[in-house]
Image (tube, rainbow, N blue to C red):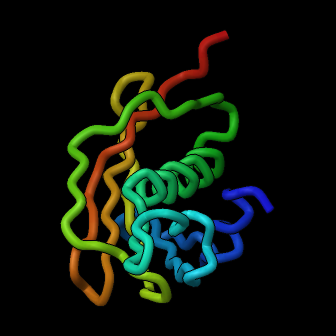
Amino acid sequence: MELNEHISNSCSDLEKTESGYKRSYIFKESFPGFDGHFPGNPILPGVIQTLLGQNSSMEALEREYPAEKLIMQSITRCKFLRPVKPMEKLDLTFSLKAKGLNHISICSLTVDGETAATYQLIFGPEEL
C-alpha cells in the first residue's frame, strides 16, 4: 500500500468550518511513517505532518477553485512543538487565503488541544 493510501485510511472526512477546514488523524504504530523514526520510541516525522496539510489543503483548493491547476510551491514558518506518538488523535485545522495568483494555507496540528506543529503552505499555478 502506498503512503498516501495509509494516510487516507487514517483520517476523517475533510470538514468546512466557519474559519476554514478541519480533519483528524489517528496513526497506528504499524503506520510506515514511523519506520525508523525512532526505533523503540516512534514519533511522526515532520515531513509527514506537513504532508497532511498539503494533501488536505489541495483537497480544499480543488473544491473551492476547481478550474485552477495548483501545486505546492513552498513551506514557510514551520515549527514542530511536540512529538506525535502512535494512536494519538491529531487534529488538523487550516484556513485558505488568496494572495495574487497564489493561495496560502495556514495550518495547525494539535493533540489534546496542545499545538504539535504550525506551518504555512504556498500554492501557485502549475507551470505548463
Residue nearest the viewer, comparing 77 with 81: 81
**Which quarter of the picture shows residue 20?**
bottom left
Question: Most extreme residue toward the right, as rendered?
Answer: 1
- Measured as percent of width and height from the top left, residue 113 is found at 25, 85
- Measured as percent of width and height from the top left, residue 3 is found at 68, 58
**Which quarter of the picture shows residue 112?**
bottom left
Quadrant for the C terminus, please: top right
Quadrant for the N terminus, please: bottom right
- Looking at the rendered structure, the number of numbered marks drawn on it comes to 0
Q: Is residue 55 above or below residue 97?
A: below
Q: Is residue 4 above or below residue 29?
A: above
Q: Is residue 70 above or below residue 48?
A: above
User: Going 37% across and 56% down the picture, which residue do you hit?
Assistant: 46
User: Going 40% across and 68% down the picture, which residue do you hit?
Assistant: 38
User: Going 70% across and 74% down the picture, which residue do you hit?
Assistant: 9
- Measured as percent of width and height from the top left, residue 105 is found at 38, 47
- Measured as percent of width and height from the top left, residue 44 is found at 42, 68
Q: Is residue 95 left or right of residue 12?
A: left
Q: Is residue 65 above or below residue 2?
A: above
User: Going 50% across and 52% down the picture, which residue do you hit?
Assistant: 51
Question: Most extreme residue toward the top, as rendered?
Answer: 128
Residue nearest the viewer, comparing 22 with 53: 53
